[in-house]
Amino acid sequence: MNANPIRVMLVEDDEDWIAAMTDFLNREPDMSVVGSAASGPEALRTAESLVFDVALLDIHLGDGSLDGINAAIELQELRPDAKLIMLSSVGESEVMTRAFTAGAVNYIEKTDFRELPHAIRHAVLHPKAMDALLKEFGRLKREEQLKELTVAEREVYDLLEEGMTGSQIEKKLFKAESTLKNQVNRMLKKLGVRSSKEAVRKVKRKGLL
């Protein structure tokens, strides 16, 4: 075993899969499975105290919905230093896009599990190219969401994202309270949300809520 192995966390609701992958990955001299979780909430609780380099997440947790996507979003916010690799039994392009939008650095079908050691090493040891692609992808997704806003609405949104309050924005932009309220309401309608806080959250999460 390598003195500093790559530490892996598994997020999967199939106990047999966890056992098999733990055995499979622990055979690699430079890897160690250090923990697992069976659901998104459990993964977040585990991640608060567990030290890991890579998380392997099943996209279809629980009832078969895309709960793994939600878990990936929140893990990315909690542990931005960790690399996320999504696992699935299907190769649908839309699901793949959602996985990368959530911050995954790779997407692997479970039938191709033998590719995991290479994918894990590449994610940790050679991250620059994928990090650059994800950064640009994130920028494009952000602009895609904000493209319908007017210049004035975009200016207001940017200040909300910075954490400014309504009264602070009024003073900074020399706007009347009624004018700002109208602009915010139009902005929320275009973004399909109910509050400024939800607007910022949605844009930061690249449209995934």
Image: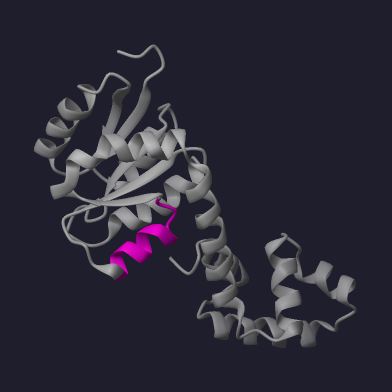
User: How far across and down, in percent of the image, does residue 2 sit?
Assistant: 35, 14
- In the image, is residue 95 part of the stretch drawn in magenta? yes
As for residue 54 lying within the magenta part, the answer is: no
One can see residue 151 in this view: yes
In the picture as drawn, the residue positioned furthest to the left comes out as 16
x then y, percent, for residue 86: 30, 50
Q: In the figure, residue 160 lies in which quadrant?
A: bottom right
Query: Which quadrant is the N terminus positioned in?
Result: top left
Q: Nearer the viewer, residue 48 or 100?
A: 100
Q: Quadrant of residue 149?
A: bottom right
Q: Quadrant of the C terminus?
A: bottom left
User: Image check: 100 left or right of 173?
Assistant: left
- The image shows residue 7, relative to residue 201, as above or below, that is above
Relative side of 168 to 54, left or right:
right
Left or right: 157 with respect to 23?
Answer: right
Q: Quadrant of residue 50?
A: top left
Query: How many marks on residues?
Result: 0
- In this rendering, the answer to whether 191 lies above or below 38 is below
Which portion, as a residue range, is magenta?
Answer: 94-104
Tell me where residue 42 appears, x and y as whole percent: 31, 40
| Image point (63%, 82%), residue name | 187
Overall secondary structure of the magenta section: helix
The colour mode here is one colour
The residue at 72%/60% (across/down) is 162
Residue at the image position 43 percent from the left and 61 percent from the top = 101
Residue 181 visible from this viewpoint: no
- Relative side of 188 to 184, left or right: left
Looking at the picture, tell me which residue is in the foreground, 128 or 178: 128
